[in-house]
Amino acid sequence: MFDHIISSEKPSNPVRITAVQESDFKKWLGKQSDAHQAWIASSGYDGKRGTHLALAGDAGTYQTIVISYVDDAKTQWDFAGLPTALPAGEYILTDDVTKNDAICEKAVLGLYLGGYRFDRYRKSEASTAKRALFAIPSNDATKRAENIARGIGLARDLINIPANDMGPEELEAAARRLGEEFGAKVTSIIGEDLNKRNFPAIYTVGKGSDRAPRLIDLHWGDENAPKVTLVGKGVCFDTGGYDLKPSSNMLLMKKDLGGSAQVLGLARMIMASGLPVRLRVLIPAVENMVSGKAYRPSDILQTRKGITVEVGNTDAEGRLVLSDALTEAAAEDPEILLDFATLTGAARVALGLGLPALFSNNDDLANGLLENGLALNDPMWRLPLWDDYRPMLDSKAADMNNISGSPYGGAIIAALFLDRFAEGAKAWAHIDLMAWNPSARPGRPEGGEAQGIRAAFKLIADRYGK
């Protein structure tokens, strides 16, 4: 996903990329040759962050690319436009970047993410076109950047693949490939075995599809290390079930496995870094379809926790499959339990598409995720598990309903539902996210997106890193 922009050999005569802080631009400009100053003036280049300009050498060819940046949480995006903006050729970062670990990591991450492409279904000419190639220094900063980028790229790819090629079985295959790469053990419980093994909610939601539902389970790391468990919603396509979505809302429902994509991308970062944790990843993988076998509104479901749930709406299926997975995860009492899910439109109405909603039963965990998110420009915003709303999930026919009768507070209601099944977990956080860029920006192309996993990885690495 990134190798097409990385030079595999040391370039013979690369164009140098020199980075200048926006606040230092005037000072830098005063040190340039008269010819370059005249060229910069005639070009109208003013050194604003994220902008660049080519400077000619003596022979009239490109000699240097100057790019302006600001050293803050968004630095990586200042560099992210280069892979698509620069003409084909070989480029190298100068010492002003490579000798500063913090800037180097951000710059290289920006190059990687700016070079991301999803061309699985494009004609071969698109993948063989000549592009800008970057010589990346071999140091710890660039290795960290590559690790983050590959985790994000994995998440993006899984979301971008359409449902005809990414059903529950294919999602399991992706988890198995990841497990094989890093020596993790991956198992699954499939179809009617879910009922036999007491995962009835996953089975009930998924049995309406011809593609068998399953619970994917990845284990990695020393059994005696601190336990970190990740749960991801893996609804590979969501029609809404009998509470059918309108066609406009169904168009993006290949992304409803976005939570599972996040946890596999995060798991890749953790395993590639060799963090000393006992990692477990649980993905309930289903399709929510309409058929003679599909569950119906007003059905009453069993769950692994023994709580019965009345179905107020079949389009609130994500919380149902997560209920069984969270019950299993919480039973092991991990040090950290995180779940990621494209769960509610209400969270998008409240916070927009680029700001996931965070809920947690642990202030220390929540604050850590929020602080890291702001520091890395991978933000979340905390919403409350508001106790006064719990009665809104009451049911006259079962222990609880999967929705409330109110049109308000939908993201909180969904989180309160999950909270019943994460009960007992000492530090649980639920991230309700979009997992999609509706329009393109440098380093963030239109399509599937990773949200919150850089922040989560930093928190885990800081707590348990070597």
Image (cartoon, rainbow, N blue to C red):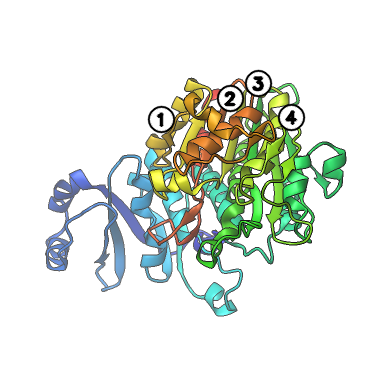
Q: Which of 230 and 265 lies nearest the eye of the viewer?
A: 230
For numbered disc 3, what is the local secondary structure? loop
- Do callouts 3 and 1 mark residues in contact (Cβ within 8 Å)? no
Query: Percent position (x, y) of residue 357?
Result: 46, 39
Q: CA distance from mark 4 to mark 3?
A: 12 Å
Q: In the shown orientation, is residue 363 left or right of residue 32?
A: right
Report the residue marked by disc 3.
424
Q: CA distance from mark 3 to mark 1?
A: 25 Å
For numbered disc 4, what is the local secondary structure? loop
Disc 4 residue type (three-letter): Lys
Disc on the earlier residue, 3 or 1: 1
Disc on the earlier residue, 4 or 3: 4
Report the residue marked by disc 2.
464
Query: Percent position (x, y) of residue 95?
Result: 36, 46
Q: Residues within 10 Å of mark 2 (few under 14, many from 20)?
A: some
Q: CA distance from mark 1 to mark 4?
A: 33 Å
Q: Residues within 10 Å of mark 1 (few under 14, many from 20)?
A: some
- Comparing marks 2 and 1, which lies closer to the viewer? 1
Report the residue marked by disc 4.
305
Q: In the shown orientation, is residue 466 left or right of residue 356?
A: right
Disc 3 residue type (three-letter): Gly
Q: In the shown orientation, is residue 111 left or right of residue 466?
A: left
Quadrant the N terminus occupies: bottom right
For numbered disc 1, what is the local secondary structure? helix
Q: Which of 74 and 362 lies nearest the eye of the viewer?
A: 362
